[in-house]
Image (spheres, rainbow, N blue to C red):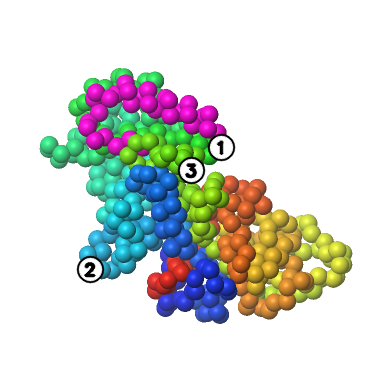
Amino acid sequence: MKTARGPLRIAGMSAPPIYPARSTDLDRAWLEVDDDALRHNARVLRARAGVPLLVMIKANAYGLGAVDSARALGLPFADQDEGQNQDQAHVSAADRPWGAGIASLDEAEELRAAGCTARLVCSTPLRAEELARAAALDLRPTLHREADIAAWSALSPAGALRPWHLAIDTGMARAGVRWDGVTPLRRILAAHPPEGVFTHFHSADESLVSREQQDVRFDEALAALMDVLPAGCLTHRDNSGGIVSRTTGSPGQLARPGIALYAGMFADELGLRQVPHLRARIVDLRHVEAGESVSYGATWTAPSRRTIATLAAGYADGYRRHLSNAGVVLIHGTRCPVVGRVTMDMTMVDVTDRPCAVGDVATLLGADGHDLLSTEWVAARGGVSPYELLVGLALRVPVVRCTGLRQRA
Ligand SMILES: *Cc1c(COP(=O)(O)O)cnc(C)c1O
C-alpha cells in the first residue's frame, strides 16, 4: 500500500529532521519504509553468508509490504525490461537474491499479480489440495510426504519436473521429514529429484550448541540421501540467526534471512540499518495537574503539573498496548515518555520538557534527528518480540517508501 497522492519529499536518513513538512498526504500517522536501508541490510547479509539469498518476504515482508520490498531488494519484475523497475538498478547483479520465500498461496498470488517473476519458495507445508494452484502460480513448494511429491510430479509437464524443495526437520518439530527418517524417501527422491533440500533452526540466534546439533543432523540426512540427490541440488539452512552466528559463511548454496533484513537483529557489529519508521502527528495538547490521571484505567497519575500531547496512533496502528507507561517517542529529536495506556487510536506522551504544537510529528519507532528507537529496543520496552511488532505495524497507516536518494511516487 502506498499513499494515493503525489510524491513525497523525504530527505535522507542522515540529515535531521527526516520527516516531511506538513503534507496533506500525511495528516495523522504513517509508516516510512527505508528501501535504501533494506538494500543495505541485504548486501551486508549476502556478504556475511557468502552465498546468494533466498530473501524471506512472507507475511507481507514482515509487515512492511511484500511487493515494494521485493522490488527494493532487486527481485525481477516483468516490467523491468521497460525500465520501470528502478530498484533493480540499485542492486548489483551479484547481490540480486536467488529468490524469495513466502508462506501462503495468497502471498504468491499478490506477487505474481504485481508482475514479480522471481523464484518463489513456499516455506510452509501445502496440503495436497493446494498443489494445483501452487503449480499455476509457478511456486516452489516445500514437500516431504511421498504422496505429495508424486502428486507434484504428476502436475509437471512431461519431461520437466517442476522444482520443489525437500523439508527436513532437525529439531524444530514444525514441518518436514525427520532427519533420522529420510531413508524411506530415497526411491521417490531418485524418481522425482528436488531442486533443493533445507532445514530450519529453532535457536540459532540464541544457542550455538543447538545450531550445531541441528547442523550435524542435517548433514546426516544429506549423507543418507547423497547418492539419490541430483548434482547441483541446492542445500540451505541459515535463517538470520544462522547467518549472523557464523564467521565463515553459510554452508550450502543459499541462505534465508528474514528478520535481519527488516530489523537490525542480533548483531550491532554488522551495522544493519533501521528500515521502518512509524510517525504520528500531535492532534491535541493539554495540561494536567498533580494527582490527575491520563487514559483508560487511570494507570498513570501526574506527579506535578505536566503537559500531555495526544498522538494520532494507537494499537490499531501497530503501536502495541504493551507500550503503555513503557514506550518512548521522539519529538523534534527529544525522547518523551508514553503516559497511561496506549488506546486503539491515540497515545499520550509527556511533553513538559519539549515544547511542541498540534501538527508536529512524533516518531514512535525509528529515527528522528540523531536519535534512534530501534525495532528491538521498542519491542523490548513493550516486552513483545520484534517479529510481532513488525508484522503489526501496517494495520491501518499508509506505508510510504522512501530512500536517502529519491522518493517513489
Ligand atoms: C521465517 C523463516 C525464515 C527467516 O527466519 P528469520 O529468523 O526471520 O531470519 C527462514 N526460513 C524459514 C523456513 C522460515 O519460515
- Of residue 405 and residue 114, the one placed in the foreground of this image is 405
Residue 72 in picture, x, y percent from top left: 38, 61
Write down the residue under mark 1: 206
Screen quadrant of the N terminus? bottom left
Circle number at residue 244: 3
Residue 278 in picture, x, y percent from top left: 56, 64
For residue 366, which quarter of the picture? Answer: bottom right
Residue type at the position of mark 2: Glu
Please tell me whether mark 2 sits on a helix, a strand or a loop. Answer: helix
Sequence order check, earlier mark of 3 and 2:
2
> What residue appears at the point 25 percent right and 47 percent down from the top-left corner?
138
Please tell me whether mark 3 sits on a helix, a strand or a loop. Answer: helix
Write down the residue under mark 2: 82
Around disc 1, counting alpha carbons within 10 Å, would you say few (fewer than 14), some (14 to 19), or many (20 or more)? Answer: few
For residue 93, which quarter of the picture? Answer: bottom left
Screen quadrant of the C terminus? bottom left
Front label number (1 vs 3):
3
